[in-house]
Amino acid sequence: MNKGIKVLTLPPYPPVRALDRGLKLIEQLSESGWSTPQSLSRTTGIDRSTVYRMLSTLVNAGYVARRGDDGQFVLSGKLREIASGVRQDDQLIGIISPLLVTLVNKVFWPSDFGILSGGRLRIVASSHHLTSMTIFRGLVGKERSVVSSALGRAILTAMSEPERELALTALGTPFDRAEVDRAVTATREAGYASAIGTTVAKISAIALPVNVGDRVVGAINLVFFRSALSPTQAATKHLEQLRATVKAAELELARLYHHSAETP
């Protein structure tokens, strides 16, 4: 069995000092609003002549605007346009992916993070490529059944009744209502969702929803060979670590959503 997963990291290049100072200047402008070069020099610790050169570069690039009457500077809307281009999915992946790496290093079995969108359950982050305890590799972008996968069942169970009805209606394909009801009941009773051989005959999974407040944003599973573990055995051995991973994700996502709500 694996003794740990080696994650490739970039070599420790020395920081680019000019870029570091430029970012510090942008951060200070974001915090203080309209500012003079003199005040920016004082608050950032960057010498005044360098501040002037950086501001001139940022103005020419369209990231900073200069007020003519008093010569003060402020960030332009261009940076907001760039920030708005950071899709919520990308932010989710940035938070979840490192947590999946930590989890696979602890339990050796791989995990996926799936989200429900437009009636489709899509895997957006995965750790299958980091372990030999899988038959899968490139799972990111793959779809799973909303009704019969552990990911889907975890999400459906975490939804309110009206939300679940809308999600099932959005499937656009026939589904077994009795199967959904049985899965929701079983998930509530067990405290986790499970699936046995629904995607590939030799594979099983357990899963937990990821919630932010009263909203379910996705689910994280733990995938294992049926020959090695039953869902009950997997839960006995690994459910607490899966819960810890979900809890860590929820804390980070709560900060993200709270920050986004406060951003005008």
Image: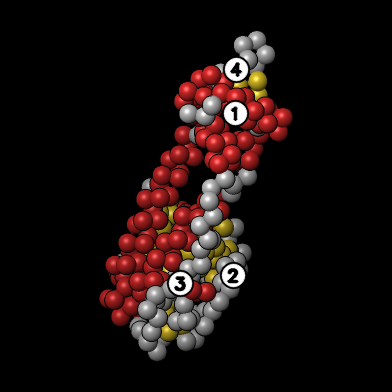
Mark 2 or mark 1, which has the lower sequence index? 1
Give the mark toward the camera: 2 or 1.
1
Residue shown at 40%/81% (left/top)? 2
Which residue carries the number 2 mark? 142
Mark 1 or mark 4, which has the lower sequence index? 1
Which residue carries the number 3 mark? 6
Which residue carries the number 4 mark? 72
Q: Give the CA separation, mark 2 to mark 4.
A: 50 Å
| Residues marked 2 and 3 touching at CB (< 8 Å) | no
Q: Give the CA separation, mark 3 to mark 4.
A: 49 Å
Q: Amino acid at mark 4?
A: Gln
Foreground pick, 217 / 90 = 90
Residue shown at 57%/67% (left/top)? 140
Q: Amino acid at mark 2?
A: Lys
Q: Secondary structure at mark 3?
A: loop
Say which mark, if any, is on residue 214: none
Q: Give the CA separation, mark 1 to mark 3.
A: 42 Å
x, y percentage for residue 39? 51, 20
Crowding around mark 2 (Cα neighbors within 10 Å: few <14, some 14 to 19, many 20+) is few
Crowding around mark 4 (Cα neighbors within 10 Å: few <14, some 14 to 19, many 20+) is some
Q: Secondary structure at mark 4?
A: loop
